[in-house]
Amino acid sequence: MKKQLLISLRIMLVLLVITCVVYPLVVWAAAQAFFPRQANGSLVKDAAGKIVGSSLLAQGFTSPWYFHPRPSAAGSGYDPTQSGGTNLGPASRKLIYGAAGFEGAGQLAADYRRENNLAPGIKVPVDAVTRSASGLDPDISLANCLLQAVRVAQARHIPLAQVSRLIRQYTHSPSLGFLNAPYVNVLRLNLVLDKQYPLHP
Amino acid sequence: MTTIGWMQIALFALLILVFTRPTGRFMHKVFEGERTWLTPFLGPLEQFIYKLSGVSPQEEMDWKIYSAAMLAFSVVTAAFTYIVLRLQQYLPLNPEHFGTKHAPAWAAAVTPDLGFNTAVSFTTNTNWQAYGGESTLSYFSQMAGLASHMFFSAACGMAVAIALVRGLTRRNAKSLGNFWADITRSTVYVLLPLSLVLALFYVDQGVIMNFLPYRTVHTVQGSVQIIPGGPVASMEAIKELGTNGGGFFNANSAHPFENPTPLCNFVEMLTIFLLGAGLVYTFGIYAGDTRQGWALFGTMAVLFFIGAAVAYTQEARGNPLFSQFGINQSSRSLGDLGGNMEGKEVRFGEAASTLFATITTDASCGAVNSMHDSYTPLGGLVPMANILTGEVIFGGVGAGLYGMLMYAILAVFIAGLMVGRTPEYLGKKIEAYEVKMAMLATLILTADVLVFTAAACVMHVPHAAYWNAPGGTSTSLVSANTNNSGPHGFSEILYAFDSTTGNNGSAFAGINVNTPFWNLALGISMLAGRFLMMIPLLAIAGSMAAKKKVPASAGTFPTCTPLFAGLLLSTVIIVGALAYFPAVSLGPIVENVLMHAGRTF
């Protein structure tokens, strides 16, 4: 056993150098050389050139002239230091009817209807009233995006057709033709709106 | 459910089928020390490792020495990780100053019990996480303390599986191979080169790979957001490939920095099954008849499809309690984004989320790209049941194969009882000793899950004292740490012991397990689930290796036929699942009935 422990110690040290020093450093060097934008977090800038976030991480949008992401359970909302979901089961009273400081699905659906002035017969897309697994889901479904388009166009005083055109342009169509349903990245769409139709010209 | 969803599942299965043979052949060559096309490049590295470590790769080990080497290696590496985690404040690459008095307000500490739990968790290939990575661990802790085990524990799992296979297929032999050579070869020729390629692909897709401090930005609407950094891609690659599953971030593979695109997600899923499926073919080569491997493969494939189909159909039906609010969950209009979207990411949708959940629990991976805790009762039953049956559906690298071989031994034993003949497997007699050892492994794990779950449901600890202080706020019950009430709360407890004993590491993650009671109880489960399974199996390997091969006769029950695959399937279901049926009834099944009756908790 003593012999095995000694070999364990030696082989661990050797393998540590290979798998935990050499390997990550090689990946790091290649990543920084070939894919520096992605390796450093896919950061995005606003029209003024200031870094405002990462295109991969949702951030809170509440103003009517912006598209809104899905609700978030990461920290107090969209907090990348506290990623995670609600972890509430489907029959959780809190999830359905809400609790102190926590909006339930019914409340979220009612808010969504009011904000977007939905006609009574129109249903709210489920992604708009559920919190994602990471709390940082940067995307919304195309259906969710289109229902918000009227509000955004009105708040910005621009024709709906212009907003719809941008949505079409920024829709992520299925990878390889079938790996996902069409979705839209909220931050990218909001940034291009700000760029093409500045709020304070 | 949508056509494209089913197509994803079908394409996934097809690609695994295509990769199985080349991967299996390659691994057979590697473990037998034969030349591969990588030998000219990596052979010197292999020899260099032997030289520096004082290993003689030709030296054969019997099952006791092999086990001793495996245990010694596990003890030493676990101790190393515990030390790294507890001393991270004195170690480099800690830009957020975790563990020091300059740590940010949102940071969490590595307590002794959390250090123990985490060191055990990564040593046993469980990768259960009682902490949130981005708020607790330095880059050095993640890289050296945790990612190291992703290589080590995967290599150990493969080594034990290969040792068992050698035991089953060698004749009149005393030895099972050399543990050090086995872990070195699997690391150098399989894990390392594949990880390197995968890591670069992941970075291309958007996975981060840097050592920068966290960046504070002012968002478009003027609030503050802290964007984490870290060497994620290098860890992400081995995380799935080695069926480890420990995420750099709390949200694991649901985090956009770990799994940014649908394509990246698809590749991550493929790599979870790649080596486990390949090893089944490797087994066939060792057995001298690849049909022996395909028989196991067939059983695994059937169980995989059942799980994937149930999880997908259940989740795509959505939450019945949502319909009262005029919420659209229909996949007719929303495509794959219609269904239960709580705890799921839009870029994956229902099919890729449920497929990932099925795969990660078929194998002992435990990475998640959606929150299993928020699944519908029967959707969430799939990952739970996959782990309860021992994660033998392709399984963890090594662990899946040795688990399934244990079931195979029980299956031929049951067949032997039915026809009244001494059972044989691969031409060797299965006798009392082997069956005792196989049953020992099965019973210890079952007892561990059920006894701990029952105890945790009723146990009290001193009120607001050390053992459960952060979780038990108003009560002394340790079960107060659950995030849900009613049957779903019970499911959280059952899943926790299920996942840790099965060395899976996924969770019904609402439960607060970062307290001394939970960290210790779950840590013990992980140790039991790993070593009290491995050691009886190595004992079987040792005893089988010494036996002589008896020629097949008319009375031999062939183990390469669909009939055997069917018997094996029944054995997995009867032995693995029936033991847990009462417990499962109290959780997901009751919850399903009550949820459809409109009850909330």
Image (tube, coloured by chain):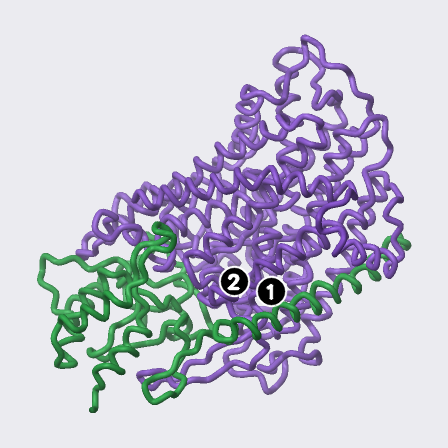
Q: Which chain is purple?
A: B
Return the mark for residue B465. none
Three-letter residue code for mark 1: Ser
Q: Is residue B184 left or right of residue B354?
A: right
Q: Residue furthest top?
A: B554
Q: Based on the displayed image, in which of its 4 quarters is residue A134 positioned?
A: bottom left
Question: Compared to B296, does A201 lie above or below?
Answer: below
Three-letter residue code for mark 2: Tyr
Q: Is residue B274 left or right of residue B260?
A: right
Quadrant of the frame with the C terminus of chain B: bottom left
Q: Which residue is mark 2?
A: B202
- Badge 1 element: helix
Q: What colour has chain A? A: green
Q: Is residue B101 left or right of residue B15?
A: right
Q: Which residue is mark 1?
A: B234
Q: Earlier in the sequence, mark 2 or mark 1?
A: 2
